[in-house]
Image (spheres, rainbow, N blue to C red):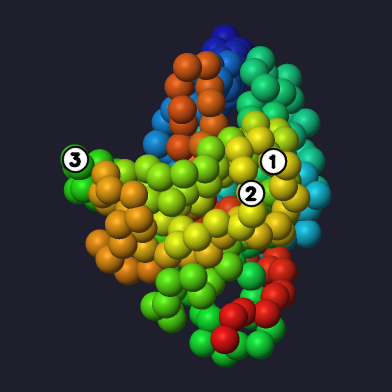
Amino acid sequence: MQRKNISFYGGILFIFVFFSCIGIQYLTNLGHLQSINTNVLESQLFRSTPLSDDMIEFLQEKEDPGLYVGTYWIMTNFEQEPLHEKLSEELFQKKIEQYSFVDGWDSYIEICRSIWNDVKYFPIPKASNQTDASISYVNSWMYERNYGKKRGHEGTDLMAEKQERGYYPIVSMTDGVVRHKGWLEQGGWRIGIAAPNGAYFYYAHLDSYANLEEGDIVKAGDLLGYMGDTGYSKIEGTTGNFPIHLHLGIYLNEGENEISINPYPILKAVEHSKIKCEYSQ
């Protein structure tokens, strides 16, 4: 009888310790969310925001993509095990409810929304009258760049198939206000749009501008200018230092820090959302 009691209580103790360890580890993982505004936002992992092809497809019909991207990032980076479940609305709602009790969750999701929810269009329109207006781009986030000094590439380059300055129109991906316009040594002729929820969209190496000035209000799809190859020089108007392309950067201001965000997954998510326009002959 005594041996049975020892076995019984030993089994109970084992179960208690086993589930306690799992629970402590799980809460430890989720506990990182409590410092998300100060630590996670500045991490390379958050800024690069890797998304699976399934997730990008899942996002394309969502009216609140920032909520789903933020939840996906936590699922895939703070859970103990890799995500095996098929992405579904039910899965996301379960996870959102699960994470919502953690301090800092609401602020974190608002930041994710500021990056994602204002984006409506791909920045290069679809040509309605041309067949040679294709572009290409890859995930070049943090690729090495050496002009000025060695650094990581904070953006995505959309490369022109037709190497002709002023051929490809560039449109605003978001509503917003023109915050900066003019020459930068690295960016050439550039224009910066502050979107309503706080993200800053930076379009660089333009050949020319639309009729816009700093302080002007733009709508998503409005013409900003035309693709070129300006930059990499202190001399305004310098061209020819690299192929014709659009450099797109996305930034957040967190306190006094400017945080760059990888545009590649955002571009992939809105690749199907292109306005149509006639290109110049």
Quadrant of residue 183 in the image? top left
> Are the residues at dot 1 and dot 2 in contact (C-beta closer than 8 Å)?
yes
Q: Amino acid at mark 3?
A: Lys
User: Horizontal and vertical percent for residue 265?
Assistant: 54, 54
151, above or below 28, in the image? below
Circle 3 crowding by C-alpha within 10 Å: few under 14, some 14–19, many from 20: few
> Dot 2 corresponds to which residue?
212
Circle 2 SS class: loop
Q: Amino acid at mark 2?
A: Leu
User: Horizontal and vertical percent for residue 96?
Assistant: 74, 34
The residue under the point 42% across, 31% down is 43
Q: Amino acid at mark 1?
A: Asp
Q: How far separated are the C-alphas under marks 1 and 2?
A: 6 Å
Q: Which label number is shown at residue 149?
A: 3
Circle 1 SS class: loop
3, above or below 202, in the image? above
Circle 2 crowding by C-alpha within 10 Å: few under 14, some 14–19, many from 20: some
The residue under the point 45% across, 22% down is 257
